[in-house]
Amino acid sequence: MADNDFLRMTGHKLKDSYFDKAVLPVGSTEYHGEHLPFGTDTLVADSLATAVVGRVEGMLKLPVLPYGMSQHYAHFPITMTLTSETLIKLLKELFDSLNVHDMRRLLIINGHDGNISAIEAASREFRVAHPEFKIAVLEAWWVTAGELLTKGTFEAWGGLGHAGEGETSMMLRVAPDLVNMSRAKGHIPVLPEHVQVKWLFHEVAPYGVTGDPTKATSEKGILMWGALVNHLVSFVEHMDRDGWEVDKS
């Protein structure tokens, strides 16, 4: 892992190695109930990125971004948040830093729902200006994990939710020493179908948690984490074979 970790790398090591792509984990620092740490989104994204670079040749792991757009969670202390505008600008400047040095293949692993729209805007706008710069994004691992696993793996709300069954299970795999299951308590809100209501989190989560974290297990976390890592490794290897071009049929 350390061989591919840019934060720990010397200039000599960089010059002596070959990297043609990078992975950027993006997280947040915000309330995750009484049972999970504030850095849950950051820890999960960083863990996935670390595992991927350990199995993919020529991939550089960039330092994780620990802050995201979390304003809708700000009623719960202590939420550290950027605005969407700031996050978009920050991402574009990081893209440009890579592009200047001919690192033009980037995988983003996102750990937080509030970052999705900013990552989308930054990526689309930067690619229009710099079509040579290729970007792929795992936007919502919590959705993808459910799609990769056998139906029925989760017991409550499809495993979804902020600090719910799926995310708590992932943390039991990623950092079990930071999870206090005796404090786990959640709420499954009743939301309309097909049309999204743009809620503030305290309006749908009295405990700062949605879903049911009491259904979380380390076994489910192991399955989720493994499926996601395998999928990402296969994806990057496929992209490398196709020169990071799409629709090669």
Image (spheres, grey):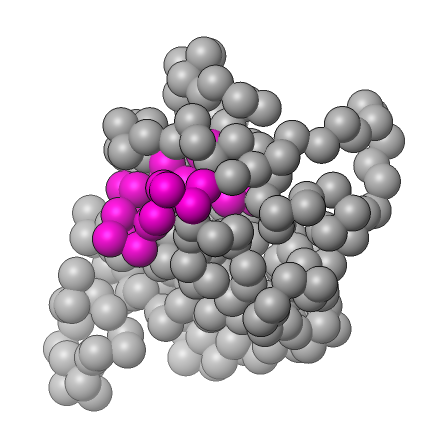
Q: In this view, does 73 lie to the left or right of 170?
A: right
Number of labels in the image equals: 0
Is 45 rendered above or below residue 14? above
Looking at the rendering, the stretch of residues picked out in magenta corresponds to 162-184
User: Which quadrant of the rendered structure holds the N terminus?
Assistant: bottom left
Residue at image point 78% right, 30% down: 191
Could you say which is closer to the camera, residue 21 or residue 102? 21
Could you say which is closer to the camera, residue 239 or residue 122? 122
Q: Is residue 194 left or right of residue 187?
A: right
**Does 166 lie within the magenta span?**
yes
Is 240 rendered above or below residue 8? above
Residue at image point 71% right, 72% down: 83
- x, y percent for residue 31: 55, 59
Residue at image point 30% right, 42% down: 172
User: Mainly helix, strand or loop, the magenta region?
Assistant: helix
Residue at image point 24% right, 69% down: 5
Residue located farthest toward the front when viewing the structure as drawn:
182
Q: In this view, does 199 lie to the left or right of 226?
A: right
- x, y percent for residue 55: 20, 47
- x, y percent for residue 159: 50, 28
Could you say which is closer to the camera, residue 109 or residue 172? 172
Q: Is residue 137 visible?
A: no
Q: Can residue 195 be seen in this view?
A: yes
Could you say which is closer to the camera, residue 118 or residue 200? 200
- x, y percent for residue 116: 64, 52
**Does 150 lie within the magenta span?**
no
